[in-house]
Image: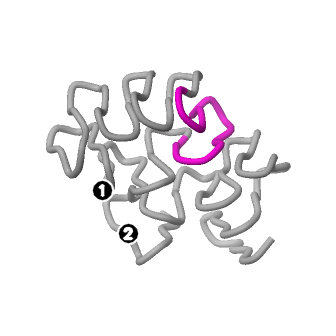
Amino acid sequence: MSVWSTGAGWTRGTSLAGSLLGHTSLAGSLLVHTSLAGSLLEHTSLAGFLLGHTSLASPLLGHTSLPGSLLGHTSLAGSLLGHTSLAGSLLGHTSLVGSLLGHTSLAGSLLGHTSLAGSLLGHTSLG
């Protein structure tokens, strides 16, 4: 509801997918700090590694594991130990099944502290 981008699809306070429920979108887009296109506005990465508290590629950037489960805030294997899950079930705040509640991504990217394309632009990345 704050910033609306029509480029790759990223928003600051609103979801461009359809409807958002507080801090989540049901169409695969994040309401607060994420985009439904797979890019998060905060610091998330859907490319395979998170820059904030988790990394799913191989290197750990914060507090996570590379096998698929992050010990920090999110996991890319399907279950998150911190705040989000990308398998469909949210352990903390969100699920990557299509709707994110707070700190997760729906395509393997985390909404809280990650970059969608491996590069974060301050507080937003639109692929």
Point 14% across, 44% down: residue: 59
Q: Give the labeled residue for mark 2.
A: 120
Instruction: List x then y, in percent, for residue 126.
Output: 52, 66
Residue 116 shows in the view: no
Which kind of residue does numbered mark 1 sit on? Answer: Leu
Disc with the residue nearer the chain's start (1 vs 2): 1
Q: From the image, which quarter does the N terminus lie in?
A: bottom right
The residue carrying pointer 2 sits among few (fewer than 14), some (14 to 19) or many (20 or more) residues within 10 Å by Cα, namely many
In the image, is residue 69 above or below residue 47? above
**Is 29 in front, or is 95?**
95
Point 23% across, 50% down: residue: 62
Which kind of residue does numbered mark 2 sit on? Answer: Leu
Q: Quadrant of residue 7?
A: bottom right
**90 part of magenta stretch:** no
The residue stretch that appears in magenta: 91-105
Q: Are marks 1 and 2 in contact (CB under 8 Å)?
A: yes
Q: Give the labeled residue for mark 1.
A: 51
Residue 67 shows in the view: yes
Point 54% across, 65% down: residue: 41
